[in-house]
Amino acid sequence: MSTKINVRSPFYLKYGEPALPAVALDCTTINLQGFAVDEYGNLTLPDSDYGTIASYTSTAGDFSNGKFAAVGTATSRTVTFAISIPPNFSNAGDSTINCNATASQPATVCTGGITNNGSIPNQAIDTDGDTATVDLSSYFTGGTVTQYLITNNNLDYFTHSLSSNTLTIIGTQRAGVKNMLVEASDGDATHCKATQTIQVTTTAQATYACADAYFSGGSISQAGVIVNPTVNGTITAIKDSSGGSTITSYPANTTGSDRDVTLFFNITVPTGYSNTGATVECSKTFSQPTAALPLFTCSIASLTNQAVYSSGAIVKGIADVGTISSFSPIGFDAVTTDTSRTVTYTLTPPASGYSNSGGSNITCDITMTQPAIKPTAGTNVWYTGGVGLDFMTKAQFQAVLPSVTTLQLNFHTYEGALEANGLYDPKKRITDKAKITLKLASSDVASLVNTYAFLDRGTGNPYLWQNNNNLSLYNPTGGYYWRVTKVQEFGAYISPAFLQTSHYMKLESSGIISEIWLVDWYAATFTKIA
């Protein structure tokens, strides 16, 4: 029996940049091509010279769930496609432009074949990777089904996999009620096919709390100017007391010494939580300097890419701000069990811009795990795939190579790749499907730091994922960043627009995981959480 999975995602199209940025994008320039409708009403989405399909619809009364009904005579079909406008066009502020495409749907001429056997029951799953399985053979009759065609336009709500007659539906990010279609055929072109609609309800499980905010950065200047931290969500108000009035600045510090200031932030909960759209108040404490210039600290230096190899050698790593001048100790002996190691890094402040510029160096302690010679595999199933890049942010790469070019930033950092390719990533350079199975030490993503990544081999023993023969040319440790998820992804290319948020691990050449990052693709924020 053969199976065919056809995921009708609206994000398939090729993308090109216009020669003249002042030109307004119109439907002639977009040039929709290749649109078709088969005899059962299934759509073949068109290609375009510019832009990507954001959504599509039709005014026809029999258009539903992304397809038309079958017809007895050839029927002209018109579909309106909303095309996203790339930023280089003068009308980019309009976000999308509607363009029509027309094709003839041939009459359905068939006899016999597969027919529906009752209706497939509604399915209900959670958004945290919950699954539901359906035995499709129970819902079709009239012959032997040799092929299923799955139409799923809602990959941000659920994905699916098909094995023989078993359809598995997997909850992803968003909560809501959506439909998917299953078309069954016996493989004979003269025989009729049958289509079933499955209603799927996805329910958010996790409740957003302040621990999910992942505060990063932010500051209060001596004059009281507030720079918001990066958060998982959207900050809508700042207050100087819990439940207090909204403020836009804080009183200047004239006390003669630095002081701690706790600010309270109203955060709108992002998609993917049971309280999505609610407002949660969370606090963060800042050090407000007494001098006009901020104090250069370990937090501002933002040390990343430090590591201890199994041999005991220490990796210097990088600092986003300032210069690492030395570290102590200079190495460790090899160990037979994973061992926690603390390394003291000495940093020289920038020559200007900080109250201690030109003054004494500062020291920052980093605690890491020195891996043992024989690491063991975990038992928790995770998935990875797509593209592994050298850095998460542009600032990391610029700290390693101050002369780095824009092209290098676009190809070697996720932040640069997002800016260059956009949320829908038509050139497939950012995310893609996570379908490679890993065996990791914990089910909690933040607890994966200082544990090993093993590749699953099915019935064979897992093997350590090492990159000793394929080290990064730019990252000081030689490691790469890879997306990880608890959901195995199938079907078409999965873009950042579908994922909305993602977790990334820093995989060192030894196979140890040294960092965990949270990415909000829509907010374009990259936050190291562990």
Image (cartoon, grey):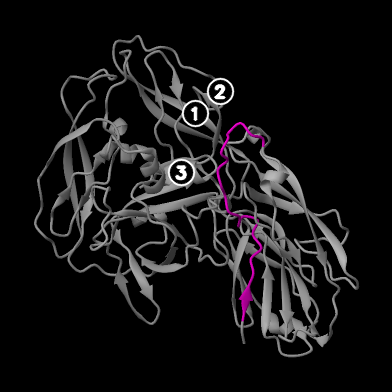
Residue at (28, 20) in percent of width and height: 354
Quadrant of residue 106 within the rendered picture? bottom right
Q: Secondary structure at mark 1?
A: strand
Q: What whole-number distance in Å separates the C-alpha atoms at marks 3 and 2?
A: 21 Å
Q: Judge from the rendering whether residue 362 lies leftward or rightward of residue 406; answer left or right.
A: left
- Give the residue at x 44% y 32%: 229
* Position of residue 202 measured from the top left corner of the image (x, y, whole percent): 65, 59
Q: Given the image, on which type of amino acid does mark 1 rest?
A: Phe
Which residue is labeled 2 in the image?
244
Q: Earlier in the sequence, mark 1 or mark 2?
A: 2
Coordinates of residue 508 in the picture (x, y in percent) = 27, 56
Residue 244: x and y, percent?
56, 23
- What residue is pinned by disc 1? 264
| Residues shaded magenta | 3-24
**Residue at point 75%, 61% (across, down):** 66
Compared across the picture, whether 453 is left or right of 445 comes to left
